[in-house]
Image (spheres, helix red, strand yellow):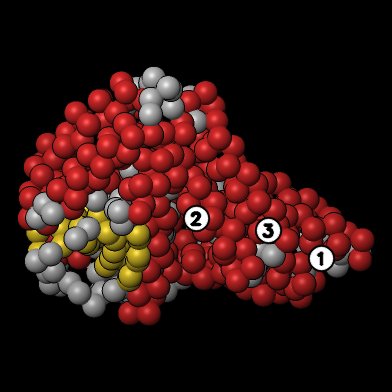
Amino acid sequence: MKKINLILCCGLALALFGCSSPKKAVLNAGGDAEAAVAEVAAIKQEALRNQADLLALDEYMEGAKVLKRAEQALSNGYEKEMILNYASIAKAHFEEANIISGVRSANANRILHARKSALVAGLRNSDKLLATLDDVDDDLRDDTDNFVVSLSPEDFSAFQKKYFSMEVKAVQFRELDGVRKAIRTSSNKDAGDLAPGSLRMAKLDLNEAENIIAQSPRNPGIHGDSVKKSAESSVFLLDVMDVILNAEGTPENIAIKIVNQNRQLGILSKNVGLLEKNLQTSQSNLATTKSNLSQTEDTLKSQEEALKAQNEALKKSSTQIKFQKAMEQAGDALSEDEALVYQQGNTLIFRLKKIKFASGNSIIPSESKPLLSKINDIIRPLGAEKVVVQGHTDSIGSAAINKKLSIERASSVAKYLASFGGGYRILFLGYGEAKPLESNETKEGRAINRRVDLVVTAKK
């Protein structure tokens, strides 16, 4: 099998480099293949911070291509020598890209600042914005003859506007993507017919937040309140739709009263789905009665009192019962290689095993997103007060880089969970290599230590 792997790997090398002898760099990791790949991945991130993907595109892309080969070879268990060879070549390309970037940045310093602001705003999290960035970058390289000449004042102003526009859209995406998804979800469930008033309000608040962000994208103190208001409107819309869909025939105005009543009762979970079977009979009776629009206020009051009594009973159910139900659901929905779920005191821990970030990267792989969707489906009916996303790494690389990477990965998972509009507060922390579960001296131990944990606190 090793011979086959070596042959395949050699084939990849020939396809990539032909008969030439590419430049190589000395690896600080020595003969440790896994550490070498992590080392080069960190240098790639440095090149991105230097905006080498703009200033030295050819060298950067060549380095990224070879690094990907190294990562694939490592994942497939190819020979160590071949992995180290790939890593050495990739490092040389990234180092060259950093040198070129330093030289060329002199003719593009001010426009680089505008581009960096867009990147810092989170532009890379949107595939659509990344495509736009590539187009603008291509135009900038053409207009500067690959940064040999400086931009004219008119061209500088035009490119500055383009990058600022992308920065605005990146902030809007970062702050409001979850709101947009919630509105789309409700619209797809016929909110336009079933809850037109709530849908209209959610759209108005979204548009207002977008406009205020456009005016002050770098100042959360200015746009923060409008973003919060928009998020609340979108969740309110989801809640109203839950009432209507769970009790067919309920008019929007009655559904709004029920949602507002739940808020007054202090129910932290903002979805009527929390009531589940305990409220099905009440909701059914409520829908039947309220379909008759001539009912009296006394009838409405008595039904709302009955709903309140059932809500109070639900609130008194113990945390242990909630966790037990959630763990049973997790046992049905999740395989052992996807996640480990267990109770720890008054929290429920989801230890995720299949969030396989690329080395040195914090972007959630598309194949891992269904797992997070299933996790949300378990947490949401639990009535969670908050979910703390904890990022952990192994000890490969510096402690500072690992700490930063763990925070970025935890943030990515937190943002993706927030996009579901589950009604629970989400926080994130990064511990880097500080809390290993196993020894980092073995490959198996390091694999276990590279993890994301979700710590769920149920509503009291």
What distance separates the C-alpha of mark 1 from that of mark 3?
38 Å
- Could one spot residue 152 in this view of the protein? yes
Please tell me whether mark 2 sits on a helix, a strand or a loop: helix
Q: Position of residue 397 (x, y in %)?
A: 33, 74
Q: Which residue is depicted at the point 12% across and 64% down? A: 346
User: With respect to residue 173, does 90 lie above or below?
Assistant: below
Which mark, by number, is residue 148?
Answer: 1
Which mark, by number, is residue 350?
Answer: none
Which mark, by number, is residue 212?
Answer: 3
In the picture of the structure, the residue carrying the numbered disc 2 is 64
Task: Tell whether label 3 touches label 1 (CB within 8 Å).
Answer: no
What distance separates the C-alpha of mark 3 from that of mark 2?
38 Å
* Towards the viewer: 139 or 153: 153
- Left or right: 415, with 227 as reference point: left
Q: Position of residue 215 (x, y in %)?
A: 73, 61
Which label's residue is closer to the chain start, 3 or 2?
Answer: 2
Q: Which residue is depicted at the point 69% across and 53% down? A: 211
Q: Quadrant of residue 244?
A: top left
* Towards the viewer: 176 or 390: 176
User: Tag 1: residue type?
Assistant: Val
Which label's residue is closer to the chain start, 1 or 2?
Answer: 2
